[in-house]
Image: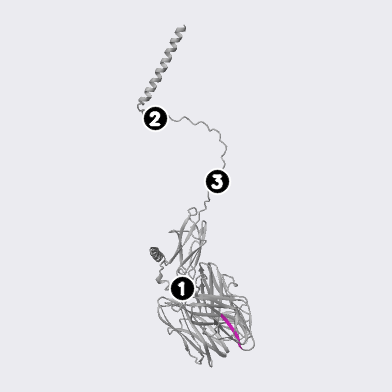
Amino acid sequence: MKRIWTIVMLSLIVISALDMFFGFSISNVKAQKAADSVISSYQKVVENNVDVNSTSFVNVPDMSISFVTTANRNLQIVFSATVAMSLGNTMDVEPVVDGDESKAVGPFGFAANAPNFDCRTAQWIVQNLPLGYHTITMHSRVTAGTGIIGYRSLTLNVIDPTVTPATWFGIANESNVGINSTSFEPIPNTSITFQSFATMNLQVMFSANVLMDNTMDVKPAVDGDLNDAQGPQAFAANAPNFDCRTAQWIVQNLPPGAHDVSMNARISIGDNGVIGFRSMTVLLIDPSESPTSWLGVSTSNNININSTSFQDVEGMVIRFSTAERINLQIVFSSTIVMPFGNTMDVEPVVDGDESKAVGPFGFAANAPGYDSRTAQWIVPSLNPGDHEVKIHARVTGDSGTIGYRTLTIRLVSVAPVPYLGLRPDTGFSSTTVVGSAFSNNSEVILDWDGNVIPTVPTKVITDATGNFTAIISIPTQTVPGFYTVSATDEFSNSASANFVVVNMTGQSGPQGLKGDKGDTGLQGPTGPQGPQGPAGSSGDPLLVLIAFSAGASILAICLASIALFRKRA
C-alpha cells in the first residue's frame, strides 16, 4: 500500500511539472485543437482583361505571389478566371514555381471553345518545396489566334506535411486515361487514404483535363460509397479539344477511423472520353472548432435561371461571425446547362454588396449538355462582425439550369505574424536572412544581439508583399555561442532568430618529441648589488656547545703534536 501511494504521489508531481512548464494537464488534453496542416494562405485578385496571343508561355499580369517557407512544404495552387477564345483554339495555363514550370503538377490545357466569356478553374499541387524564398507566377499561351483572360483570382495554401494528424491531403498525376464505361469506375492513381481521430467534415476538390464529344460524370466515393459526397455529378460535356474542369464536393460528419476517398468517372452519353493531367485534394474540417475557419453548404436539386437580373441561388447562403479582420476565399461549384450562344453570370454577394468579392464574372456559356463550372473569389479585408455570403445568378438569353451545387468559404487571417529565418543558422562566416509578413515596401534594420549590423544590400527594403532577403557577416566569428538576429521595419513589426557561432578551435594534438639541447647562452651582465639583508638571529646554544667541543679537540691535538716533535728533538 505504501508503494502504491508513493507511485501516485510521484505521478501527481510529474503532471504538475508538465502543467507548469508545458501548459499541459490531464483535464485539457481532449480540449486541445488539432493542428491544421494548412499553415498559411495567400491570395491575389485582379479585375481587368488581358489579351493572350503568344504561342509561347508568358506571364499573366498581376498573377504572382511571393512567400517564405521555414521548412519543406507542400502547396495547393488554385487559379480561377473568365476566359474567351475562338472555337477550335485552346489556351494553356500553368503555374511557374521559382522559374521552374515542372514543379507544379495538375491540368495543362485550361480552356477551349469558349467564344463567349466562360469560367475555368484549375488546381495544382507542389510536393516537397524546400525552405526559403519562393515566387509563384501564372503563365499562359494559346495554340492559335488570340484569347482573353478576364477577371481572375489566385490562391496559394502552404501545407506542413509533418503535422499529425494531418488535415490536408493531395495527389496529382500527369497521365491520360481512357473513360469508356457507362458505370462509375475508379480513375487510376486518384485515391487518398487517411485516418481521422474525430468526426470531421470534408472538402474534396478534383481538377482535370478532359476530352470528349458528349458527357462525362465524375464523383468521389467515400469508403466505397458514391452517395456520401454532395456536389456536382456531371463533370464535362462537349470538349472536342482538351479543356479543364474542376469540381468541389462536401462530406458532412465523417466518423473517426480509417477512410478512403477515390475519384470515379463514367460516360453518361456517347462512346468514350479521356481524363488527362489531374489533381485531387481532401481538406478535413473539425465541425466543433470555434471559431471556425471553414464553412460549407450543398444542395442536390435543379433550379431554373431565367432572369436577366441577378437572383438568389436556392440553398447557397452561409452566415458566420468573426472577431478579427479577415480575407475570405469563396468557392462555388455546380452542374449547369446553358444553350449555345447564351451566358450565365454568377457572383457572390457579401453582406448585400456584390462588389466586395473579386474574381470571375461570366460563369458558364455554351453548355447544351450537363456540364460543370467552378469559380473562386476573394474578399479582401472583411471587418469583424456578423456576415452573410449568398450566390446570385442571371442569364443573358433564354434560360439556364443550375444543378447539384456546393458553396464553401475559408476564413484567412489578414495579419500574419512576421517571420525571420537564417540560412544557415550555424557557422562562423556569414548567413542569409529571409523575412516575411513585414510591412510592405518598408525599410528593415537588422541587429546582432542588439547592435545594428551592416547588410548586403546596404539598405534592406521589403517587397510589395512584405518579404525581404539580405546577407550579413558574423561579427563574433571567434566567440562561440548563441546569438540573436532581429529585424524591425519602419512600423515596429519585428521578428528574430537564433544563430550559433561554432567553435573553430580544434582539440590539442599529442606532445611532440623532445628537441636537441641548445647551445649555452652568453653570460649575462653582473646584476646590481642587492640590499643588505636583515640581521641574523642568535645561534642555537646546542650548536655553540658543539662548536666549542670541536674547537677544544682540535687545540688538544695541536698541543700533543708539538710535544711529540720536541721529545724527538
Q: Residue furthest top?
A: 569
Question: What residue type is disc 3 on?
Answer: Pro
Tell me how far mark 3 sits from mark 2, CA to CA. Answer: 47 Å
In the picture, the disc for residue 34 is 1
Residue 247 or residue 326, whichever sits in front: 247
Amino acid type, mark 2: Pro
The answer to which image quadrant residue 23 occupies is bottom left
Of pointers 3 and 2, the one earlier in the residue sequence: 3
Dominant secondary structure, magenta? strand
Q: Residues within 10 Å of mark 3 (few under 14, many from 20)?
A: few
Magenta span covers which residues?
262-268
Q: What distance separates the C-alpha of mark 2 from that of mark 1? A: 87 Å
For the N terminus, the quadrant is: bottom left
User: 230 or 200: nearer the eye?
Assistant: 200
Which amino acid type is marked by label 1? Ala
Q: Which residue is mark 2?
A: 531
Q: Callout 2: helix, strand or loop?
A: loop
Residue 396 seen from this side: no
Q: Is residue 550 magenta?
A: no
Looking at the image, is mark 2 or mark 1 earlier in the sequence? 1
**Which residue is painted at 45% across and 71% down in the image?**
416
Q: What residue sits 46% from the left and 64% below the top? A: 444
Q: Residues within 10 Å of mark 1 (few under 14, many from 20)?
A: some
> Closer to the camera, 2 or 50?
2
